[in-house]
Image (spheres, helix red, strand yellow):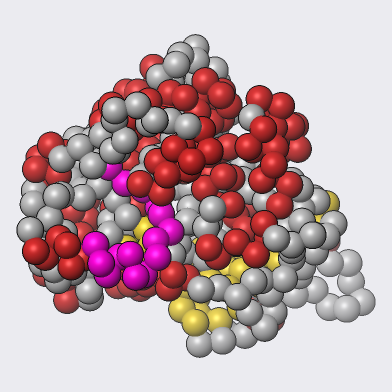
Amino acid sequence: MSPSCFSEWRKLPISLSELCINTTLRCGQSFRWHRLPEEDEWRCVLRGRIVSLKQDLSYLYYRSYSPRPPSVPALPTPPASTPSSRADVESDSAADETLAIITHYFNLSPNLTELYSQWSSSDPNFKKKAPKFTGIRILRQDAWEALISFICSSNNNIARISQMVEKLCTNYGELVGTIDGHAYHDFPSPEALTGEDVEARLRGLGFGYRAKYIHQTAVIVAKQREKGWLDSLRNPESPVFGVEPAPGGEMRPEGREGYRNAHEKLLELQGVGPKVADCVCLMGLGWGEAVPVDTHVWQIAQRDYKLGKGGNKSLTKATYDAVGNHFRKLWGKEAGWAHSVLFTADLRTFSERLTSKTDAEIKQDDDPESQTQVTSTIATKRPQDDHDDVPGEKAIKKEETVVQAAETDPMVTRRRSKRFRKQ
C-alpha cells in the first residue's frame, strides 16, 4: 500500500508546551513508534489501526489507516454528481475515533502547563530545567505492552529494546498493513506468547535470558490469572480506553493503596523487579505517583536533592523507597510524571537543550540512541554474553541493587562489564 491509503490529515490545536511528540516519543516510554525522518512523521499501530502523526508550533496533525473487517462491506463511492454524505459520515466517524484514541493515549486531559507550574513552585531544580523540556506527557499505554517492553529493557539500550519489540510484533502480532514496504503489526497478546516454542524462538531472535521471562510471564497472565487481571490493577482515574474515570483513593507518603497493591502484584511476575514494576505502574497502569528509580535517577537524587549524604550512599531497597517517598512528598500524586521530565533532561540525547536558548524544537534532533543505556533489576554478576541466562527472579530480588532506564557512558559500561567478569 501507499500513504494514499491513509485518511486525510486532520489537526488538533495544541501547543508545544502541552505536547511535544518529538520528546515524549523518544524518552524511553514507548518503543514501538516508527519515525519517517524525511517527513518528520511518526507512525504506530494503536487499537488495530495505523496512526500517523506530525506536529508544528500550533497543531498536532493526525491521520489513520484501519483495515475493514471482512464482515463489514465498504460503502460504495458515490458519483461526483450525488451527495457524499454516507462516505463523509464514515470518514468523520473514523476520524473522531482516531482523535479519541490519540487523546487517551497521550493523556491530554490534564493541563500540563498548570502541572509544570505546580511542580516548579515546589522545586527550584524542576523550575530551572523544565522550561527546556516542555510538552512531556506520560503515555497511557496498554498495560500488557508496557509490561513486556520493560522486561525487555533489562540491561539494554533504547535502540535494541525497540528492535526486540519490533521482532515481537513482527513474529507474533497481527499484521495491520504494509505501507511503502514497512509492515505494521499490532502488539502480540499474552496468549500469542504462550506456545512451548516461544522461549527458544525468542532466544534465536536475540532476546537472550529475557526470552524466558517473556514466555513465563505470558503463561502466568494468560493461563494463571483471570481475564482482565492486568487492567484490574489500573488507577481508576486513568482507566482503559472507553471507560469513565473514577476516584483513585487517598494519597499517602508511600502512594495510594491501589498503587502499592499493583506494585506488589507485578512483583509476582517473572523478570519484574521494583523498577520494572514502577515503570509499568506509571506508564501502563496510570499510577502517577510511581517513581522508577535506577542508578541514574539515584545520581540525580544525590546530586540535585542531597539524598544519600549520610552513611547509605548505595541504591538499596531502603534508599529506593526513600527516593520515591521524597519525590512524592515534593511533587504529589503525579510525582512519576515530574520525575520523568527531569530524567529526560538528564539524557544525553537531549543534552543540547540545556545550552540552547530555545524551547523544545519540532525538528528531530540527531538521535544517538546507541548512547542511551537502559537497565533494569540485575543480579550481582552480569551475564558476560547477552544470550546467557542470569540468576532466577528470586535471586534477582534478593539483590538490593535496583536500576531503571538510564543513560550510561559506553566507556563506563565497558569498564563495569570487565569488573563483573572478574568477580
Q: Is residue 171 left or right of residue 417?
A: right
Residue 118, given in percent of the width and then of the height, sits at: 70, 27
Q: Residue furthest right?
A: 81
Q: Is residue 137 left or right of residue 213?
A: right
* Left or right, 196 with reference to 147: left
Please tell me how many numbered marks the rendered image carries: 0
Quick check: 289 above or below 153? above
User: Which residue is pictured at 43% across the width and 64% down the height?
Assistant: 372
Q: Quadrant of residue 152?
A: bottom left
- The answer to whether 335 is drawn above or below residue 392 in the figure is above
Location of residue 331 (image quadrant): top right
Q: Residue at x 8, y 52 (%)?
A: 391
Q: Is residue 314 left or right of residue 247?
A: left
Instruction: Classify the position of the N terminus by image quarter.
Output: bottom right
On whether residue 415 falls in the magenta region, the answer is yes
The residue range painted magenta reads 402-416
Q: Is residue 382 visible?
A: yes
Residue 154 screen position, x and y as percent: 28, 56
The quarter of the image holding the C terminus is: bottom left
Whether 374 is drawn above or below 366: the answer is above
Is residue 404 a member of the stretch shown in magenta?
yes
In this view, the residue in front, 350 or 46, is 350
Q: Residue at x 62, y 58 (%)?
A: 23
Residue name at image x 40 percent, y 52 percent: 405
Q: Residue 179: x percent and y percent?
A: 55, 81
Residue 144 shows in this picture: no
Give percent across and percent down for residue 219: 17, 48
Tell me: residue 293, above or below residue 352: above
